[in-house]
Amino acid sequence: MARILIVDDDQELIEATTAVLEEHGHKVFYACTGSEGFNMAKLEKPDLILLDVMMEHDSVGFEIARALHDDEATSSLPVIIITGVRKAKNLPFKFEPDEDWLPVKAVLEKPVSPELLIESVDKALKA
């Protein structure tokens, strides 16, 4: 089915997410830093990117999402943010997709159930 890039520094999450996605027929590859993920997205042109927020620093995922959107080579790639930043930083609000500030298809809060993950992936791939 789809080629999906996971960008996250949590190896256990990468393994669990990969298992769920592969069970549904997707091919998965991953990067452990925002910059590695950005470069891999440009080279590999995945069908979808699952992007963490807190990696090298607390907001790198937001920055990478905007950089992907602003780069001609990657601007059409759908991105789903999967993050625990709201809980980790005790933020009183949720992050929502926004064309300028957070140009992504969805924002999912960790932990994400396998059912919600697959539903969100399917929806982003069809958009």
Image (tube, grey):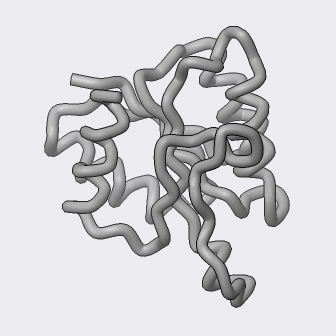
Residue found 51% across the figure and 57% down from its top:
107
- Residue 8 lies, in percent from the top left, at 59, 52
Residue 49, horizontal then vertical, whole percent:
50, 36
Residue 19 left/right relative to 75: left
The residue nearer to you, when weighing 43 against 113, is: 113
Residue 75, image x, y percentages: 64, 19
Q: If the image is split into quadrants, where does the C terminus sit? A: top left
63 is higher (above) or lower (below) than 37: below
Residue 30 or residue 85, whichever sits in front: 85
Name the residue at 54% across, 15% down: 44
Question: Which residue is at the far right?
Answer: 57
* Up/down of 89 relative to 103, above or below: below
Residues 104 and 9: in front is 104
Locate residue 4, reporting x and y percent.
40, 32
Q: Residue at x 73, y 58 (%)?
A: 55
| Residue drawn at (76%, 47%) of the image | 101
Residue 36 lies in what quarter of the image?
top right
Is residue 91 found left or right of 79 in the rendered image?
right
In the rendered image, the quadrant that contains the N terminus is: top left
Figure check: 121 above or below 5: below
Residue at the front extreme? 99
